[in-house]
Amino acid sequence: MKFSSKKIPFAVLVLSAVMLLSSCGAGGQRQEARSEGPDWHQFLGPNRNSTSPQTGLLRSWPEGGPEILWEVEVGRGFGAPVVKNGRVYLLDRDDEYGDIMRCFDIRTGDELWRFAFNSPGVHPFPGSRTIPIVDDRHVYAVGANGDLLAIDINTQQLVWQRNLWTGFGATALPVWGVSHSPVIYGNLLITVTASHTHQLVGLVALNKNTGETVWHAQELGNETYVSPKIINIHGQNQVVFTTSMTNVSRYSDVPFTLGNVLGLNPRTGEVLWQWSEFACRIAIPCATDAGNNKLLITGGYDQGSIMLQVNRSADGAFYTDVIFATPDFEDQTKSPLFHDGYFYGMFRTNTRREGLVAMNMAGEIMWRTGRNPDFERGSMILADGLILATDGMSILYLIEPLPKEFRMISSVELPLDGMQNWAPIALANGILLVRDQERMLALKVTE
């Protein structure tokens, strides 16, 4: 079924129960999921850096590319799948009805269950836009209207729900809808909220089992589309978060401020340090951990990238220095890859098309592909010493990451629509999951 053209009624919950029973063994006993390789349980993978421990990747592809194991229809949008214990979870969306959590078997593509939550509404670039996170008991996801859902993966029942925008004082949603993905830290689910008004945001830590607020860091900066990320800095885990500068085209009646990059204590929400000169009006990518307490911050929209050094003084206080800033490297929608001391990013904005670009730790550009080949806000995964990359349209590449030259090993045109295929890809159990505006494909990319 195509969610973009068909309203999903509340009867879909009955369908969910039927599908659940069909996935159970004799006597209605639930069959346990099996994992046959590394999971991909959250946004950008195990460590939120588009890197997988998967081994055994095909070092070249046959004519026609990797085998397509299955495909399923999905609704419009940019939401991406996650995988745990052989189960694929995708927050799909029908704008006329709301958010739909769907669960598939990664080996067969069989849909095992779905849970629908009534939350209609249309945003620019319609459809889904966030990525779930799953642990041993629950799958959590944020819908386009800010509805945070915690669903029991064994019973398929809603455990708790909170709205992160209207529930925190906002009267309007971000212009592109709520588009961030939560992170888990111990027993906490840390996520973005509105902060009294819709043009300011904060972070909140919720008890992941009950949804109760543990801490709330308010008014951290302007409207943003960045997801929080846990990074170890000076031996201490911190929540690193980025906000945008004031979007004057929408908020001309509020004081102008630049964006912030912040490090917070994940257990208390205390702000440990802050850099307040980020000149990006629509921040989307997470910070990239460059090691040795260095962070690469990029935001797209021709704002380039900056390298921050987070320092710590003798009294324990944190402070930052800018190592370099460059207009010649950025990634508009995803964090650049970092491998062996080099960064790889897809530099495509509304005004520049630099293709895939490599940069060293000093901010020097090593090479760029330009339009040969072109990369249109695609997605990358580093695994087994290779990069799997989509071009944001319909081509999948296998690339050897080299600092001195772009080296493509194989490429294939996938049966995709070629239009705004910007969702992050996922790799688990030797299977690569790629989606467009109509379908999701599963490709066997290991030996």
Image (tube, helix red, strand yellow):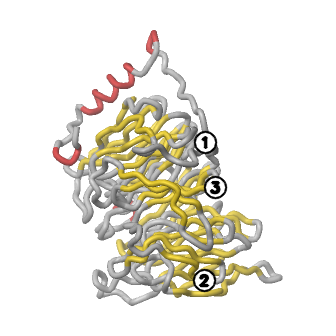
Q: CA distance from mark 3 to mark 2?
A: 23 Å
Residue 42, compared with residue 193, is above or below; it is above
Crowding around mark 3 (Cα neighbors within 10 Å: few <14, some 14 to 19, many 20+) is some
Q: Amino acid at mark 3?
A: Gly
Residue 38, compared with residue 293, is above or below; it is above
Q: Which disc number belongs to residue 363?
A: 2
Mark 3 lies on a secondary structure that is: loop
| Residue assigned mark 1 | 38
Crowding around mark 2 (Cα neighbors within 10 Å: few <14, some 14 to 19, many 20+) is many
Tags 1 and 2 touching, CB below 8 Å: no
Q: Which disc number belongs to residue 396?
A: none
Tags 1 and 3 touching, CB below 8 Å: no
Q: Quadrant of the C terminus?
A: top right
Q: Nearer the viewer, mark 1 or mark 2?
A: 2
* Of pointers 3 and 2, the one earlier in the residue sequence: 2
Tags 3 and 2 touching, CB below 8 Å: no
Q: Is residue 147 visible?
A: no
Q: Which disc number belongs to residue 385?
A: 3
